[in-house]
Amino acid sequence: MDIRVQDAAFDPGALLSQFTPHAARAGAGAVISFTGLVRDLPGATGGLSRMVIEHYPGMTEKALHDIAQQASSRWSLGPVLILHRFGALTPEQPIMMVATASAHRADAFLAADFLMDYLKSRAPFWKKEFTADGAAWVAAKDSDEDALSRWR
Amino acid sequence: MDVLYFAWVRERIGLPKERVDTSAATVMDLVRELSAREDRYALAFSDLSALRVAVDQELSDFDAPLGGVREVAFFPPMTGG
C-alpha cells in the first residue's frame, strides 16, 4: 500500500509507469488508475486563479490508510496507490491519483470507484477556490455523501 | 487537550490550534464551553450540522466522551478527491 500526501506536483504517467510493472510482478492482470484534475471556473471573472487545498496532517495519512485497508479487505487486490496533493494548485494540474491492481479487472474497477467515493467525503481535505471575484471554500455535495451508501 | 480548527472554522475562530484546559465530558460540552468564551467561537459553532468533529484523529460524533483524549478537531464536511 503506497499512500502519499504531498504539496509537490506529480506526473500521473510516470507514477503509472512505476506502478504497472510493480503490480504485474505481484501477479496482477489488471491495473486501473484515476487522476483528478483542477477544473477551471469558466463562470468566474478571469477564471480560477488558484485552488488551495488544506489538510489535517496525521489524520489524513491515517484516513487514507484506513480507506485503502477497507478496499483491500473487500476485494482481492494487488498493490494500491493513493496520492493526494495539498497546498496551492492551478487549473489543469493533477490533484490526486488512485491506482489499483487485481488478477481480474472487476476487483480493481470496483476498488478504485470505492476509494474515490470514500476519499471525497472521508479524507480530511478542504478546497478553497480563488478568483478575481474573491475566495470561497468549496462546499461538500449531498451527492458525495449519497455515493457512500452504495457501498454499505 | 489540543483543539484544532480547519478551513472556514479556522478562519472564523482566527487560529489553527490551541491548548484548552477543560473538564468537558463530551465534545458537545467542549463546544458549549468554547461558544461561551467569545462571539467568534459562538459564530463558528452556531450550526453544528455544518461541522464535523474528529477525536484523536478519528471521525467522531458530538456526543463522544473526552476522557483521556489528547486532540479534538473541528472542521466543515470534507472535500477531497
Image (cartoon, rainbow, N blue to C red):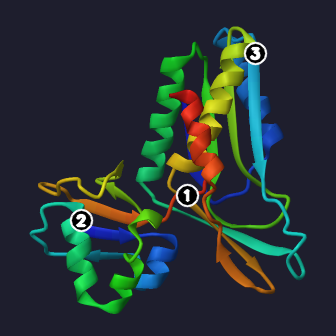
Question: From the image, which quarter does the N terminus of chain B lie in?
Answer: bottom left
- The image's mark for residue A125 is 1
Residue with the most extreme bottom position: B39
Crowding near the residue tagged with mark 3, few <14, some 14–19, many ≥20 C-alpha atoms within 10 Å: many
Disc 3 secondary structure class: strand
Q: Nearer the viewer, mark 2 or mark 1?
A: 2
Q: Which residue is mark 3?
A: A30
Crowding near the residue tagged with mark 1, few <14, some 14–19, many ≥20 C-alpha atoms within 10 Å: many
- The image's mark for residue B1 is none
Identify the residue at horizontal 35%, vertical 56% (top origin). B54
Q: Which residue is mark 2?
A: B28
Specify whether residue B1 is in view: no
Residue with the most extreme left position: B23
Q: What's the amino acid at mark 2? A: Met
Relative to A42, B3 lies left or right: left
Q: Is residue A20 above or below residue A84?
A: above
Percent of width and height locating residue A118: 56, 40
Q: What's the amino acid at mark 1? A: Phe
Identify the residue at horizontal 81%, vertical 86% (top origin). A132
Task: Write down the chain letter for disc 1.
Answer: A
Percent of width and height locating residue B7: 52, 71
Identify the residue at horizontal 38%, vertical 66% (top origin). B74
Q: Is residue A38 above or below residue A104?
A: below
Could you tell which of marks 3 and 1 lies nearer the N-terminus? Answer: 3
Q: CA distance from mark 3 to mark 1?
A: 29 Å
Percent of width and height locating residue A115: 60, 35
